[in-house]
Image (cartoon, rainbow, N blue to C red):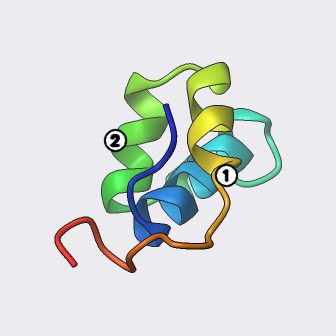
Amino acid sequence: MPARSKAQQRAAGAALSAKRGETKPSELQGASREMYDTMSEEELEDYASTPHDGLPEHKGD
């Protein structure tokens, strides 16, 4: 499932980084923290790999 906004894509990237041990989970906030806790690494990869082209900054835009 692709990300629906640039903000969602960035949050998934941050959560994926923590899942892989590249950053500390304690540094996550908001949506990225929730994604880290509830999504698998594979799901996060799908969201994080979404191209930015054509995506709104936020889901409601």
Q: Which residue is mark 1?
A: 24
Q: Amino acid at mark 1?
A: Lys
Q: Amino acid at mark 2?
A: Glu
Residue at (38% x, 76% y) in the render? 56
As drawn, 52 above or below 61: above
Q: Foreground residue, 40 or 53?
A: 53
Please indicate whether residue 56 sits to the left or right of residue 18 in the image: left
Residue at (39% x, 54% y) in the render? 4
Q: Quadrant of residue 35?
A: top left
Question: Callout 1: few (<14), some (14-19), or many (20+) C-alpha neighbours within 10 Å?
Answer: few
Q: Secondary structure at mark 2?
A: helix
Residue at (63% x, 51% y) in the render? 50
Q: Please provide percent x and percent y for residue 46.
A: 63, 34
For the image, the number of numbered tags is 2
Question: Callout 2: few (<14), some (14-19), or many (20+) C-alpha neighbours within 10 Å?
Answer: some
Q: Earlier in the sequence, mark 1 or mark 2?
A: 1
Foreground disc of the pair 1, 2: 2
Q: Please provide percent x and percent y for residue 21.
A: 79, 40
Q: Residue furthest front?
A: 54
Q: Secondary structure at mark 1?
A: loop
Q: Please provide percent x and percent y for residue 36.
A: 49, 36
Please indicate whether residue 4 sits to the left or right of residue 17 in the image: left
Q: Foreground residue, 24 or 58?
A: 58
Which image quadrant: the C terminus? Answer: bottom left
Q: Which residue is mark 2?
A: 34
Q: Please provide percent x and percent y for residue 54.
A: 52, 72
Please indicate whether residue 39 sits to the left or right of residue 52 in the image: left
As drawn, 55 above or below 4: below
Residue at (56% x, 19% y) in the render? 40
